[in-house]
């Protein structure tokens, strides 16, 4: 065997790697003069079964601290793991449900159950969020308080938490496992099936939305206090590690901005299904005046004219560009006679820390529709999209292959956006059309789809999702 890269102790001839030369020989203690200090990796605490509430247990499913829920009601047991649910449905169809068992249920039955690492208490008084989110969290806490031995949030291992949330058809327990990120500070990843949505999607980045389980965990780390239970020797390190974690002020403020802005949009962003004739006439008149350069033209800047918040009444801040947009990237006005006219679009934010609602310019009264503070499109163009959609033309074909080509032909060559900007405008118009249809008021007694106006098809399905077919089947 080659001795390259190896050395030996002059005293006892014990070998070592030159790359990891120690300061002393591990066999005889002879001074070797190296600098390598051996270190032991911290063993992560991951108990096999933890009782988080009466009859509800968190059980490990792998060596990577993946976990599932096991519940019991008398002699009946249930495991939330997908493969175990399929096996249980077979037992149920055979009328042998009481005989069902799996290795996770056996962990609860025959192994020692560990107490939680820590029981977390939400602090809504110091948690910075909107009133809507605060009320939603309080409703969840009230439901958790009515359950025996239930807590809103429980730490079950070194990096895994159980958080209580809304009870839904896909999550009748209400609890979800939430993992603490090993790379990002104050970042949690929810494993719930209903908590995988995105707040915003772009070409190169996607912003994941914050679910109720993560919001409850964030509210627990505001005051940095934990009620620890169980053996103090085993949990001492975890108590110190969890109690020093700072509160997530940045994430909370961003969540407050989003929820307050959505609440404001639901309150003020409403359009009638049949637009007034005078409004469409004013759009055509203003468009013609802008083209000829006479009379009342389209403004070059669109700024909110409000001074107070429409949601809480607080004073609005100074005007600024939409968050996430670059100052150098232009905004566009899209009309029939003035396509791709560059304009300036500003927004204002509420000054209240409990609100932070974003206010946009009121362009609907001018006959325009605001899409992400990047494109202002006239309502007559969106009405044209609606009629194409009713005739079963895909909007993804109408926008790039018909409308934008026509508008580009009308525009001066020097004002035509680049190919990259044109693709971005296509995406904005596509999403903006559905946003336009969603805020349009309709008569619900007509029993038609609120977006496309097509009569729905009634389908009957079994209450158990395991006995139903998917769309692919």
Image (cartoon, rainbow, N blue to C red):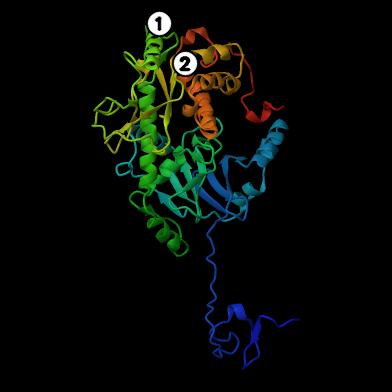
Where is mark 2, residue-wise?
336
Q: Which image quadrant is residue 377 in?
A: top left
- The CA span between labels 2 and 1 is 17 Å
> Which residue is at a point 69% across and 81% down the rendered structure image?
4
> Which residue is at a point 52% across and 66% down the rendered structure image?
42
> Which residue is at a point 55% across and 32% down the rendered structure image?
419
For marks 2 and 1, the one nearer the N-term is 1
Q: Position of residue 73 (x, y in %)?
A: 56, 38
Q: Residues within 10 Å of mark 1 (few under 14, many from 20)?
A: few
Q: Position of residue 59 (x, y in %)?
A: 58, 49
> Which residue is at a point 39% across and 34% down the rendered structure image?
258
Locate residue 358 relative to residue 463 in the image: left or right.
left
- Secondary structure, mark 1, is helix
Residue 150 shows in this picture: no
Where is mark 1, residue-wise?
277
In the foreground, 392 or 95: 392
Residue furthest to the right: 1
Q: Position of residue 254 (x, y in %)?
A: 38, 40
Q: Residues within 10 Å of mark 2 (few under 14, many from 20)?
A: some
């Amino acid at each position: 065997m080659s001795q390259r890269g190896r050395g030996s102790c002059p005293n006892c001839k014990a070998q070592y790697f030159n790359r990891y030369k120690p300061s002393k020989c591990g066999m005889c203690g002879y001074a070797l003069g190296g600098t390598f200090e051996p270190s032991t990796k911290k063993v992560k605490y991951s108990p096999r079964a933890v009782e988080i509430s009466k009859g509800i247990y968190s059980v490990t499913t792998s060596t990577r601290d993946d976990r599932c829920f096991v519940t019991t009601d008398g002699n009946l047991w249930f495991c939330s793991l997908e493969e175990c649910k399929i096996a249980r449905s077979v037992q149920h169809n055979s009328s042998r449900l009481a005989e069902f068992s799996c290795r996770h249920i056996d962990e609860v039955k025959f192994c020692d159950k560990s107490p939680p690492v820590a029981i977390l208490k939400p602090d809504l008084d110091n948690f910075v969020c909107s009133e809507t989110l605060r009320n939603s969290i309080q409703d969840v806490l009230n439901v958790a308080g009515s359950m025996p031995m239930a807590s809103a949030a429980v730490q079950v291992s070194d990096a895994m938490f159980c958080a209580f949330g809304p009870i839904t058809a896909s999550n009748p327990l209400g609890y979800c496992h939430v993992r603490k990120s090993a790379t990002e500070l104050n970042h949690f990843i929810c494993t719930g099936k209903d908590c995988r949505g995105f707040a915003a999607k772009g070409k190169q980045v996607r912003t994941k939305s914050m679910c109720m389980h993560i919001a409850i965990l964030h509210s627990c780390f505001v005051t940095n206090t934990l009620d620890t239970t169980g053996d103090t020797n085993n949990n001492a390190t975890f108590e110190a590690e969890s109690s020093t974690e700072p509160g997530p002020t940045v994430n909370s403020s961003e969540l407050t901005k989003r929820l307050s802005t959505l609440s404001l949009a639901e309150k003020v962003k409403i359009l009638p299904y049949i637009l007034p004739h005078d409004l469409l006439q004013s759009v055509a008149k203003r468009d013609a005046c802008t083209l000829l350069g006479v009379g009342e033209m389209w403004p070059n800047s669109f700024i909110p004219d409000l001074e107070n918040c429409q949601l809480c009444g607080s004073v609005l801040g100074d005007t600024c560009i939409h968050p996430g947009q670059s100052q150098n990237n232009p905004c566009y006005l899209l009309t029939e006679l003035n396509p791709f006219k560059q304009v300036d679009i500003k927004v204002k934010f509420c000054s209240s820390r409990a609100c932070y609602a974003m206010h946009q310019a009121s362009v609907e009264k001018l006959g325009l529709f605001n899409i992400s503070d990047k494109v202002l499109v006239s309502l007559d163009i969106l009405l044209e999209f609606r009629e194409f959609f009713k005739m079963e033309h895909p909007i993804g074909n109408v926008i790039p292959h018909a409308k934008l080509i026509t508008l580009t032909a009308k525009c001066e060559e020097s004002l035509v956006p680049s190919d990259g900007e044109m693709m971005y405008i296509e995406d904005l118009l596509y999403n903006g059309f559905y946003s336009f249809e969603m805020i349009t008021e309709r008569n619900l007694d007509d029993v038609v789809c609120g977006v496309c106006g097509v009569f729905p098809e009634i389908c009957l399905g079994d209450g158990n999702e395991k006995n139903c077919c998917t769309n692919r089947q």
